[in-house]
């Protein structure tokens, strides 16, 4: 650690940096125009503010070397699947457990809504042969039908932007820079942006050569150096089911340090 914010090397930080923002309907870009550039009226979410107001004198900037994206929605995994292979198996259900009826023909009594996912809603434990249970919401030991796409999480792309010496989210003059974009694959709960962030100028301390690098090539971390007055913004690319944003939301978390 350094004792002041003057004459320091970039690797010396005074204080840890941790910022997080929830992103839902803050869309950026245009799927019809195939562009990640911010459109008129769009306002991405502020992720990191490196004193854009220039009102502090305790730091000269900072570095963000970790950005993670985590979905806010979560779905319980299927507890039991009913099909030809599992037909006749004894199962035991407590409230909240999920059953997937993958083949309706093996059931003794037709399921209320046919193929799909059912959440058990009964207050007491329900035990029996899986194909003999009544998959209906009209009983005290009932089930809630969750549809055929329960638990499906579509792919979501987020774009990250940089501004300098302005508090306007994305200036109308276009005075911002697109840094990178990152996609959370379908049905994936979280991703790290380390693979798409730019390389930092300071090499990582290492011993010997590293696979994939030349004999004189340094191993480098990835991240974003921020001058005092900089900001980072993030928004959802409006494509497919995310045309109005990602309603369940994601949290974007940045970590690093202040100089």
Image (cartoon, rainbow, N blue to C red):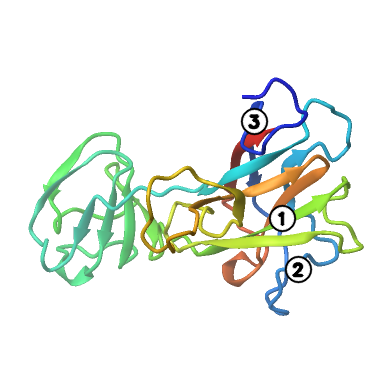
Residue 85 quadrant: bottom left
* Element assignment for label 3: loop
Specify which label sits upstream in the sequence, 3 or 2: 3
Q: From the image, state whether disc 1 or disc 2 is nearer to you.
A: 2
Identity of the residue drawn at 47% across and 42% down? 205
Where residue 121 sits: x, y (%)? 33, 43
Answer with left or right where residue 112 lies relative to residue 242. Answer: left
Question: Toward the viewer: 230 or 10?
Answer: 10
Identity of the residue drawn at 83% across and 42% down? 229
Where residue 99 sits: x, y (%)? 26, 54
Q: From the image, state whether disc 1 or disc 3 is nearer to you.
A: 3
Question: Which mark, by number, is residue 62?
Answer: none
Answer with left or right where residue 171 lies relative to residue 33. Answer: right
Residue 54 quadrant: top right
Specify which label sits upstream in the sequence, 1 or 3: 3
Question: Which mark, by number, is residue 37?
Answer: 2
Give the residue number, with chain letter if any, for mark 1: 26
């Amino acid at each position: 650690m350094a004792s002041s914010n003057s004459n320091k090397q970039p690797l010396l930080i005074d204080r840890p940096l941790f910022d997080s923002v929830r992103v839902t309907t803050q869309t950026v870009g245009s799927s019809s125009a195939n562009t990640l550039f911010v459109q008129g009226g769009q306002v991405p979410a502020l992720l990191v503010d490196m004193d854009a107001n220039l009102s502090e004198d305790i730091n000269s900037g900072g570095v963000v070397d970790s950005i993670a994206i985590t979905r806010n929605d979560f779905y319980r995994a299927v507890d039991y699947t009913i099909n030809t292979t599992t037909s006749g198996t004894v199962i035991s259900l407590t409230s909240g457990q999920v059953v997937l009826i993958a083949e309706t023909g093996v059931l003794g009594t037709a399921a209320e809504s046919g193929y799909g996912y059912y959440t058990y809603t009964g207050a007491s434990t329900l035990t029996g042969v899986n194909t003999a249970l009544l998959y209906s919401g009209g009983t005290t030991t009932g089930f809630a039908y969750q549809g055929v796409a329960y638990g499906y999480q579509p792919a979501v792309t987020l774009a990250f932007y940089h501004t300098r010496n302005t508090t306007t989210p994305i200036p109308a003059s276009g005075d911002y820079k697109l840094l990178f974009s990152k996609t959370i694959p379908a049905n994936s709960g979280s991703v790290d942006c380390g693979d798409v962030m730019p390389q930092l100028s300071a090499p990582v301390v290492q011993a010997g050569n590293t696979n994939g690098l030349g004999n004189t090539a340094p191993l480098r971390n990835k991240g974003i150096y921020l001058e005092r007055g900089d900001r980072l913004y993030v928004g959802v690319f409006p494509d497919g089911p995310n045309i109005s944003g990602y309603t369940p939301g994601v949290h974007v978390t940045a970590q690093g340090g202040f100089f």
